[in-house]
Image (cartoon, rainbow, N blue to C red):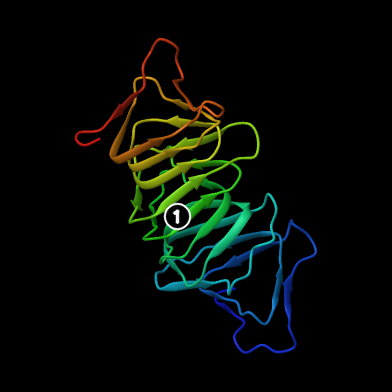
Amino acid sequence: CKDMNWTGVTNSPALTTSSTNNLLIIYGSLTLVNAMSLTFNGDISFEAPTTGHTIDFAGHALPGNYTDIRFNGSGGEWTLLDSLDASEMYFNLDAGNLITNGYDVSCRSFLGSNSNVRGLNLGSSTFRVTDGSWDSYTATNFTFVKGTSTISVDRSSSTARVYGGGLSFHNMILYWHTDIYLSNTFDSLILVPGHTYTFDASRTQTINNYLDVNGSCSSSIIIQSDAPGTQATFSKSTGS
């Protein structure tokens, strides 16, 4: 469809699907309402080729599990009017510009590594990766506005990964064992007790504000490079 707008519906309707193989493609704006249910658990793709579009999930969490929410509109732009809770879905930024507008976003993994023209303006939002990786390894044509945002990366098993692509982040919190690739800049980087953090050898992580690494005797933090004998570097120009 172009726009999908559920404003004014009665009798508690449901947007649902019979299979995770079903795909919903929206070429304009999406407006849900509280007085409905959302059980559509297939892929959802926003493919507007123009600017000025909005997305309002009205407090509904997306029920997809290991499915995709995708932004893939060359020349498109979307502004969130509500939080985007897709904690079990993969978040794909393929083309176009998403403005989070101060609302929180959660997803299983963030996938934004390509060379298409695309943008992510986080403002004051919190962007949560719940069980995977942040991937902006190829940052060509990627306009990333960090604002005063916080990005948190977590995982339930194995190792999380941050492919920063040389971007500059505001706050990043790494809640799990994490591999960090390339040289990146963080206003603040927070590492959590009980985990191991592996940084690219011969790369530099620049810290503008603070590096928070507070382990304990019973729950230490291990920092290492990915090549024994070759250092990874933390750099801070002034201050503590």
| Residue 121 percent location from the top left of the image | 37, 58
Which residue corresponds to mark 1?
95
For the N terminus, which image quadrant? bottom right
In front here: 25 or 147? 147
From this viewpoint, which residue is outermost toward the front? 217
Against 46, is 157 above or below?
Answer: above
In front here: 216 or 66? 216
Residue pictured at 56% horizontal, 42% vertical: 154
From this viewpoint, which residue is outermost toward the left? 238
In front here: 223 or 217? 217
| Residue 163 percent location from the top left of the image | 45, 36
Count of numbered labels shown in the rendering: 1
Please state if 22 lies on the left or on the right of 125 as rendered: right
| Residue 112 percent location from the top left of the image | 47, 46
Q: Which element carries disc 1, helix, strand or loop?
A: strand
Crowdedness near tag 1: few (<14), some (14–19) or many (≥20) residues, C-alpha within 10 Å: many
From this viewpoint, which residue is outermost toward the top? 229
Please state if 54 lies on the left or on the right of 43 as rendered: left
Against 172, is 184 above or below?
Answer: above
Type of residue at label 1?
Ala
